Amino acid sequence: MDVSKNVLTGTGASPGIACGTARTVQSIDQFSDLRPGEVLVCRTTDPAWTPLFAVASAVITETGGMLSHAAIVAREYGIPAVLGLNHALTRITTGTSLVVDGTHGTVRENPATAGATSS
């Protein structure tokens, strides 16, 4: 994660807080890499990405807003979403433990063990 900032800010598009390990996914070819409870970090989503929301504890995208595909599907699945986080794929690396706050639109590194979620 970009250590120059403690908190990354985007648009909170689906409420709640989730802790999990980041998994960057850049294409359909990487869908099988996402493990249950991981935080999905990607550029954008479309209907082909929908099955990943059932596996992820939260979603972070580089693009999108309250009416984007990622926002709507995250709300349907009840998982936090922070969207429009510029350069998320370069600022967050796979394996980083994160706290995603979809209510306030923030993402921060979690020094504690990943995997717990709360609303």
Image: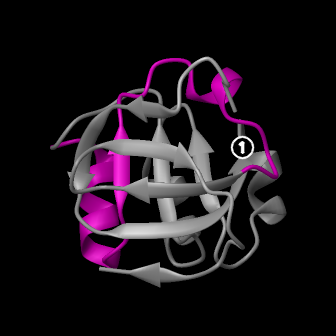
Q: Is residue 107 rendered to the left or right of residue 91?
A: left
Q: Position of residue 68 (x, y in %)?
A: 25, 41
Q: Is residue 50 rendered to the left or right of residue 11?
A: right
Q: Quadrant of the N terminus?
A: top right
Q: Residues within 10 Å of mark 1 (few under 14, many from 20)?
A: many
Is residue 82 on the magenta stretch? Answer: yes
| Residue 92: quarter of image | top right
| Tag 1 residue | 24
Q: How many marks?
A: 1
The residue located at (23%, 49%) in the rendering is 13
| Residue 11: quarter of image | top left
| Residue 88: quarter of image | top right
Given residues 2 and 50, the one toward you in this image is 2
The residue located at (30%, 55%) in the rendering is 102
Relative height, residue 50 to residue 7 (above, below): below
The residue located at (48%, 35%) in the rendering is 44
Specify start and end residues of the magenta stretch as a single range: 67-96
Given residues 19 and 50, the one toward you in this image is 19
Q: Residue furthest left?
A: 67
Q: Position of residue 37 (x, y in %)?
A: 64, 76
Given residues 52 and 92, the one toward you in this image is 92
Q: Position of residue 6 (x, y in %)?
A: 52, 32
Relative height, residue 39 to residue 61 (above, below): below
- What element does badge 1 sit on? strand
Q: Amino acid at mark 1?
A: Thr
Q: Position of residue 70 (x, y in %)?
A: 36, 50
The residue located at (57%, 69%) in the rendering is 56
